[in-house]
Amino acid sequence: MSRTLPAPRAAGVRGRRGRTRSWLHRVAGVAVVLVGATTIAAIGAIVGAGRSGRRAILIDELAVFEPNPAFVRDVGTALAASGYAMEYVPPQDVSVERLRSLPGDRADLIIVRAHAALIFDAGRWTDDAALFSSEPVDLAHFDISGLRALDASEPSGPSGPSARPSAPDEPSHPAADAAPIGATTLSAAAAAALVPVRRDVGADRRPYLGLGARFIRDHVRGRFRDDAVVVLMGCDTLRGRGLSEAFLTRGARAVIGWNGPVSAAHTDRSTAALLAHYAAHGSVADAVRSAMTVVGPDPTSGAFLVAAVR
């Protein structure tokens, strides 16, 4: 589906279908409560005012190569019936700036339909992941030697072959104090917290920008609503605690995601079931259990949805 690239001055590896990889510095974590399962909207705009004044937003990076209008329509209909006003963000608008401004939407439900990549740190694979944006890296501001090493090597890692790093594990640094990254201008600290990633589907092999726990925790704008629920539809998003803890630290009440690789079709089916139950009944734990009972784990990897709750 996708692969991660080395951070500046580091080499990376390529992931096989259903799992992605990345190279990033260490992500620290704190304990969360886990329960056992995983978006929403109507294409093109905000749909309905919502009887209760509740808001939902769907970030759809995955639609670049895995569009699913039926999923968007069906989930949007189910949420509208429960009083949500829904906003759809198409893939071309899924920039770093749009993602970092998500707390400002004041949404009750934030659904991120996006690829995710496991993080490689200190010579080993971690269980934490980074989310994909649709924003290309400005290669003029990054050392790209690692990209050549990546393309020349045969991968080998926890779920398949991976290349060995050609440089020590070290923080990534942009070439200037304020480096343009695609359409976004970030401080050196914010740019250094991003993860270069690459898709393994379609013809586009350019590096894109990914957001890991460090970026979510330290560089998003503001705080989420105290009752906000974040749904992360990509592979491995709750395999580790980094991403969920970052969202919880930023104010979210709960984060739902997958504990392993998942196909686009399966995450869509499971998320539709999850959100229909949650919108009708309001319980994260019950919605996760219901989705896994109705749809079940991913048939290939065995991954299932889990939730971290503050």
Image: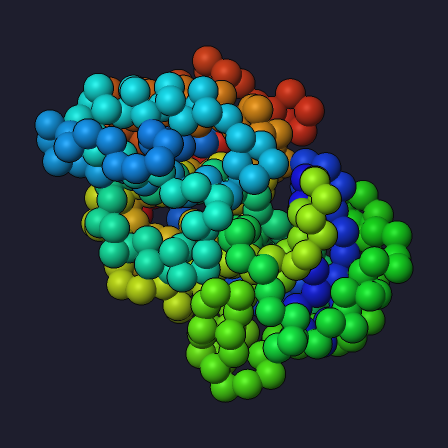
The quarter of the displayed image where residue 200 is located: top right
Horizontal relation, residue 122 to residue 145: left or right: left
The quarter of the displayed image where residue 308 is located: top left
- Where 252 falls versus 47 (above or below)? below
Point 40% across, 55% down: residue: 99
Whether residue 239 is visible, yes or no, is no
Horizontal relation, residue 127 to residue 13: left or right: left
Point 81% across, 43% down: residue: 160
Pick the residue in front: 89 or 211. Answer: 89
Whether residue 118 is visible, yes or no, is yes
Q: Position of residue 142 (x, y in %)?
A: 65, 75
Pick the residue in front: 145 or 168. Answer: 145
Q: Residue furthest bottom?
A: 177
Q: Position of residue 114 (x, y in %)?
A: 52, 42
Point 11% across, 31% down: residue: 52
Q: Position of residue 198 (x, y in %)?
A: 67, 53
The quarter of the displayed image where residue 1 is located: top right
Pick the residue in front: 134 or 241. Answer: 134
Q: Position of residue 100 (x, y in %)?
A: 38, 60
- Where 144 falls versus 160 (above or below)? below
Q: Residue furthest top?
A: 294
Q: How is the image coloured?
A: rainbow
- Where 184 falls versus 256 (above or below)? below
Q: How many marks?
A: 0
- Where 43 falls versus 187 (above or below)? above
Point 37% across, 19% down: residue: 74
